[in-house]
Image: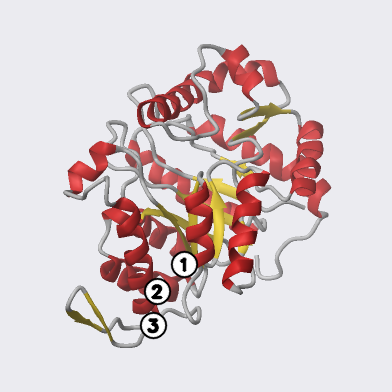
């Protein structure tokens, strides 16, 4: 069966749930999902977004680490914007707090205002990405080394050895080759056979065994389970349209590939396939289809400030009517 992910970006547009409530709800949902055997908490990153898009994924992940026992914690970091030595220290501590459940997805970044905010050259981002991945890995491995003329020795070491997984994300050939060269796996932001082939061929040319290719994008980016899908579409539409048009605008302004296009109404949301509102029976079929293609099953329960009661209604229906069908009545032993 597919991996089941919870994604939280903590966006709170003016019509949505307030940020302080979103944090509480997200942590409660993750603790609940952890007890049911969900697999991953995924935390993306952006900076300076008016709706409060979470800018600090490692800090946020530490709260999830304290509230969960099994779920892996995948934090997206736009690495060119960060000090890799500081990230290494924070990640090592987070890995210890979580008992060795952390992984980073390292993104290049593409929004000019974010680079301007941190005083980082957008044009130099590829070179910065390469050098900072190397520095991050050296720092996590615990040996003393020199970085930019400075003596570096990061302690304590993370639980996972030699390091927590460092996956490289991206949507172009250069990202796939960078993942082969410097990463522990590849997380395409657009899943194509071409990118998969480029990654595998690059690994072969380097004499490396391929790492994990994580497919979090070829399936829906939002799944909502309801006994009355038409009513649910009307309820989630403002939140889904807000998200879809945000990413579509970013993509158009910065010439990047994303699984979102501009949308105006529920009909467009339905046609996109990016958002799925399904009955329990349809969700069972969807899980089988995702499993066949090796794609993750993505829940974004608080999509752009979705109301708490509405959010829980989908998760609880999934847990009661879908999860037993796709995984059997198996509850983790220490739940």
**Left or right of 25, for residue 319:** right
- Which residue appears at 26% of the width and 68% of the height? 86
Name the secondary structure under disc 3: loop
- Which residue appears at 74% of the width and 43% of the height? 290
Q: Work out how far the residue at label 1 is from the one at label 2, CA to CA, in angstroms.
A: 9 Å
> How many residues crowd mark 1 within 10 Å: few (<14), some (14–19), many (20+)?
some
Of badges 1 and 3, nearer the viewer stands 1
Q: Is residue 165 above or below residue 194?
A: below
- How many badges with numbers are in the image? 3
Q: Nearer the viewer, residue 306 or 72?
A: 72
Circles 1 and 2 in contact, beta carbons < 8 Å: yes
- Which residue appears at 80% of the width and 47% of the height? 292
Circles 3 and 2 in contact, beta carbons < 8 Å: no
- The quadrant in which residue 194 appears is top right
Q: Position of residue 191 (x, y in %)?
A: 62, 43
Q: Is residue 15 above or below residue 40?
A: above
Q: Work out how far the residue at label 1 is from the one at label 3, CA to CA, in angstroms.
A: 20 Å
Q: In the displayed orientation, state which residue is furthest to the front.
A: 205
Residue receiving disc 1: 182
């Amino acid at each position: 069966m597919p991996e089941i992910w919870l994604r939280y970006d903590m966006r709170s547009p003016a019509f949505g749930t307030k940020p302080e409530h979103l944090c509480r709800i997200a942590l409660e949902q993750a603790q609940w999902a952890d007890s049911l055997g969900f697999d991953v908490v995924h935390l993306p990153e952006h900076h300076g977004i008016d709706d409060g898009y979470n800018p600090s994924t490692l800090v946020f992940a530490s709260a999830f680490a304290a509230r969960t026992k099994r779920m892996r914690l995948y934090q997206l970091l736009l690495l060119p914007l960060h000090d890799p030595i500081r990230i290494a220290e924070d990640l090592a501590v987070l890995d210890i707090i979580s008992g060795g459940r952390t992984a980073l997805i390292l993104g290049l970044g593409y929004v000019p205002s974010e680079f301007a905010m941190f005083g980082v050259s957008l044009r130099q981002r590829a070179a910065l990405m390469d050098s900072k991945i190397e520095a991050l890995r050296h720092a996590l491995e615990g040996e003393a080394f020199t970085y930019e003329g400075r003596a570096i020795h990061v302690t304590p070491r993370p639980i996972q050895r030699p390091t927590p997984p460092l996956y490289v994300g991206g949507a172009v050939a250069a990202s796939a080759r960078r993942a082969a060269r410097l990463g522990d796996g590849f997380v395409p932001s657009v899943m194509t056979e071409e990118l998969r082939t480029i990654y595998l061929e690059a690994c072969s040319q380097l004499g490396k065994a391929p790492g994990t290719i994580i497919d979090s994008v070829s399936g829906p980016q939002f799944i909502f389970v309801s006994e009355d899908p038409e009513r649910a579409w009307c309820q989630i539409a403002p939140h889904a349209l807000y998200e879809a048009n945000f990413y579509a605008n970013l993509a158009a302004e910065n010439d990047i590939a994303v699984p979102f296009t501009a949308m105006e109404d529920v009909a467009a949301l339905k046609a996109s396939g990016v958002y799925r509102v399904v009955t329990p029976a349809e969700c069972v079929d969807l899980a089988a289809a995702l499993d066949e293609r090796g794609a993750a099953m993505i829940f974004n329960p608080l999509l752009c400030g979705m109301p708490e009661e509405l959010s829980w209604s989908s998760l609880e229906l999934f847990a009661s009517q879908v999860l037993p069908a796709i995984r059997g009545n198996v509850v983790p032993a220490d739940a």
